[in-house]
Structure formats: C-alpha cells, structure tokens
Image: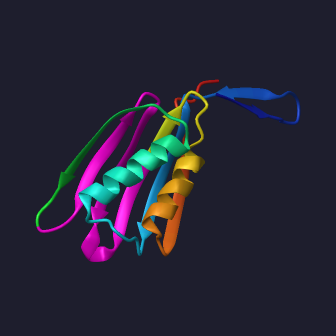
Amino acid sequence: MTIQTKGLSNPTKIEYAGKHLLLEFWGANNIDSIKFIENALIKAVKACHATLLKVDLHKFEPQGVSGVAVIAESHISIHTWPERSYAALDIFVCNGKDPYLALASLKRSFQPEKVVVTEVKRGISS
C-alpha cells in the first residue's frame, strides 16, 4: 500500500503493510455465543474478500469469548465482556484488502449501540 501526500515543496510517498482497525462495540448483541461469533467472523472475512485459514475461539465460564479468525492477509480478533455488553475487536488486513468492509459486516452481526473505531497504518516505511 502507498499513501500519496502533498507537502509545500514536493509530494511524499508513504508505504505501509496494511490497515489495522481497533474496534470497541458497546451495547453489542450475541457476544456470549461461540457459534454466533464464529459465523460473524466468517462473514466478516468474506465481506472483505480475505482468505480464511482458520477460526479459533475459546468460551470462558461463566461468560465471555475470545478468539481469532486467522486469514492469509493477517487476522480478525474478538474479546467479549457480556456482563458489560462490550466487545473489543481487531481487523488487520494487508494486500489491499479493505477492513471497513469487514467492519460493516461485524456491525450488521452484532448490532452495537455505539462503535468506536481507531485506524492504524502498520509497517510504515518512507
């Protein structure tokens, strides 16, 4: 990936490996169901046209789920706190894949009341 920036004197190219979205879902639904979460992650991978390698999830007792969809282009991870109706997710993709397509899919799945998104460009070199 390359970002083209225009300064006062000459344009600068900034290359980076991929985009990493850090997500906070508040008031999210179905965040204690391992099967629902697995399906939501698979849909998100498909939505951003990434290549799914495997999904690995763990259900905590009495509640909560943590896990990852490992993709050829990096990963989508989730950690949930059902007692707070809160889920923390990461979407990190490279090879020109669009993490915002996965974000839209995850929002449809979990229907959060509030979403906070932080974007980080990973592997920046200039």
Find residue 82 and report its image quarter: bottom left
Q: Position of residue 46 (x, y in %)?
A: 50, 42
Residue 11, magenta (yes or no): no
Query: Where is the C terminus found, in terms of image quarters?
Result: top right
Q: Is any atom of residue 29 visible in this view? A: yes
Q: Position of residue 29 (x, y in %)?
A: 38, 71
122 left or right of 62? right
* Residue sitting at the far left: 61
Q: Position of residue 66 (x, y in %)?
A: 25, 53
Q: Position of residue 24 (x, y in %)?
A: 44, 62
* Residue at figure coordinates x 51%, y 48% from the top left: 21
Observer-nearest of 119 and 85: 85
**As displayed, is residue 72 above or below residue 46?**
above
Question: How many marks on residues?
Answer: 0
- Say how the picture is coloured: rainbow
Observer-nearest of 12 and 34: 34
Query: Where is the N terminus found, in terms of image quarters?
Result: top right
> Which portion, as a residue range, is magenta?
62-90
Find residue 54 and report its image quarter: top left
* Residue at figure coordinates x 22%, y 63% from the top left: 64
* Residue sitting at the far right: 9
**As displayed, is residue 39 above or below residue 3?**
below
**As displayed, is residue 91 above or below residue 34?**
above
* Residue at figure coordinates x 52%, y 48% from the top left: 102
Residue 82, magenta (yes or no): yes
Observer-nearest of 52 and 21: 52
Q: Main secondary structure of the magenta part?
A: strand
Q: Is any atom of residue 78 visible in this view? A: no
